[in-house]
Image: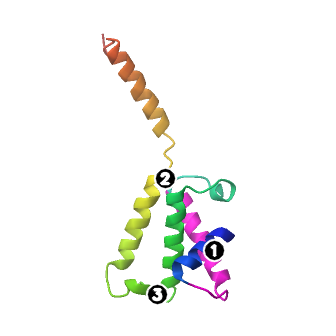
């Protein structure tokens, strides 16, 4: 997670080390959210590389947590009432790109099997 820390700090344009422990907590929370949203086991991204889209999402979310730590929407989003919701909409949209659906492969195989049968002239109920 050290690499993520440096990326989050770069995203925040943060040069001091005073908040590193806090940022690590926000990064851990963002990774936990990503794993949960994507239906992968907890700790997956500690063992396997994170897809680039998911990594960028974790950076965005950890940065949002840091900028919103006082309870506001934080940062340059403060002028917009919908800013906080827009951050979550963007985060969820990006995480969907790498989302794991356990049944997706099964459904695809099943669909291909039906397609091959249809092309071969086998019709259901015949």
Q: Position of residue 64 (x, y in %)?
A: 48, 78
Look at the numbered discs 3 and 1 and tell me whether their residues touch, using CB distance below 8 Å.
no
x 38%, y 83%: residue: 77
Is any part of residue 74 visible from this angle?
no
- Residue range in magenta is 14-37
The image quadrant of residue 87 is: bottom left
Question: Where the N terminus falls, by quadrant?
Answer: bottom right
Q: Which residue is mark 2?
A: 98
> Vertical placement of 101 versus 20: above or below?
above
x 61%, y 79%: residue: 23
x 46%, y 39%: residue: 104
Which mark is nearer the camera, 2 or 3? 2
- Nearer the observer, 107 or 58: 58
**Secondary structure beneath label 3:** loop
Q: CA distance from mark 2 to mark 3?
A: 29 Å
Query: Which numbered disc, 2 or 3, marks the residue that appears first in the sequence?
Result: 3
The image quadrant of residue 123 is: top left
């Amino acid at each position: 997670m050290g690499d993520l820390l440096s990326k989050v700090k770069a995203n925040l344009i943060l040069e001091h080390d005073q908040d590193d422990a806090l940022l690590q907590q926000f990064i851990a929370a963002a990774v936990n959210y990503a794993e949960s949203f994507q239906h992968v086991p907890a700790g997956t991204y500690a063992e396997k590389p994170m897809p680039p889209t998911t990594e960028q999402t974790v950076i965005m979310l950890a940065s949002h947590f840091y900028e919103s730590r006082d309870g506001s929407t934080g940062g340059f989003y403060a002028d917009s009432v919908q800013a906080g919701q827009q951050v979550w909409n963007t985060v969820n949209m990006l995480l969907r790109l790498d989302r794991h659906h356990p049944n997706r492969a099964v459904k695809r195989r099943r669909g291909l099997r039906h397609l091959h049968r249809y092309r071969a002239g086998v019709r259901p109920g015949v």
